[in-house]
Amino acid sequence: MKAEAATQASVNQALTKGACPICGILKDFQWTLAAIVRPQAALRLCNFHTWALARSRGGSLERSTPGESVSSVFLEMLKGSPGGKVSSDDCVLCHRVRDEEVTRLRELAQQFQRPMFVQWMKTQGSLCLDHAGKLKEFVPLRLQTFIDEVVERNRSELREELEAFHEQLKHGEHAGGGLLGRVAEFLVGQRGL
C-alpha cells in the first residue's frame, strides 16, 4: 500500500473553517507514512519521524502485530551504518512530505480559479502563516494580495477569540482549549511539518 493511496483526501475535502487544509492533509500523510514504512538498512529518519514510527507501532501494515513491523524497521536500521542524528534535509519521510506539500499547494492554487472557492476563502477559509507564504509562489500577484487578506482575517479572528478565552480563564472557565491548538497551527503550522 502506498502512502498516496492511503491519503486520498483532496484539498476541497480538507477545507474546514479555522484549519489550514494543507496542514491537515500533510499531518495525515506523514502519520500514514510512519505507519507503512518498510524495513531497510539504509533508512534515514529525522528525530520526529523516528519517534513517529515508534509511536505508530506499525499497526496498519497487513499481517503484522502491533510493534512487529516497527521492530523490523528498527532492526534493519541498526544493521546499517548509524551515522548519528539525521537532519530533516536527509530524512526519507521528510522528503516525501515536502513533495506532497508542493503537490497540495499546487492543487490549492488551482482552486483559486473557482469564484465560489474564492468567496468561501474570503469569509471562512484559513491558512497557517507558513502555507500562506508558500502558496503565494503558485498564484498570480492579485491572488497573493488576497491570500494576505485571508491571513489577516484569520489573525484578527484568532486574536479576538484568544482575548475572550483569556478573560474566561481569569474567571475560572477553562472550556475552549482547542483554540490554543488552532493558534499554534496558524503561527507555526501543524506539529512536525
Image: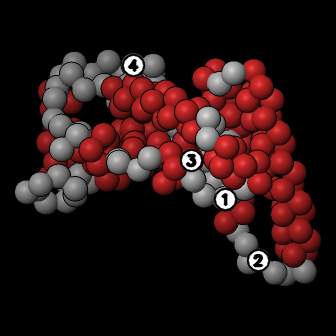
Q: Residues within 10 Å of mark 3 (few under 14, many from 20)?
A: many
Tell me the SS state at disc 1: loop
Locate residue 75 relative to residue 34 in the image: left or right. left
Measured Cα–Cα span from mark 2 to mark 3: 27 Å
Residue placed most toward the observer, 111 or 74: 111
Nearest to N terminus: mark 2 or mark 4: 4
Tell me the SS state at disc 3: helix
> Where residue 82 appears, x then y in whole percent?
27, 22
What residue is disc 3 on? 21
Residue found at the very far bottom of the displayed protein: 172
Nearest to N terminus: mark 1 or mark 2: 1
Nearest to N terminus: mark 3 or mark 4: 3
* In this view, the mark in front (1 or 2): 1
What residue is disc 1 on? 17
Measured Cα–Cα span from mark 2 to mark 4: 42 Å
Q: Residues within 10 Å of mark 1 (few under 14, many from 20)?
A: some
What residue is disc 2 on? 174
The amino acid type of the residue labelled 2 equals His
What residue is disc 4 on? 90
Q: Residue at x 87, y 75 (%)?
A: 168
The quarter of the image holding the N terminus is: top left
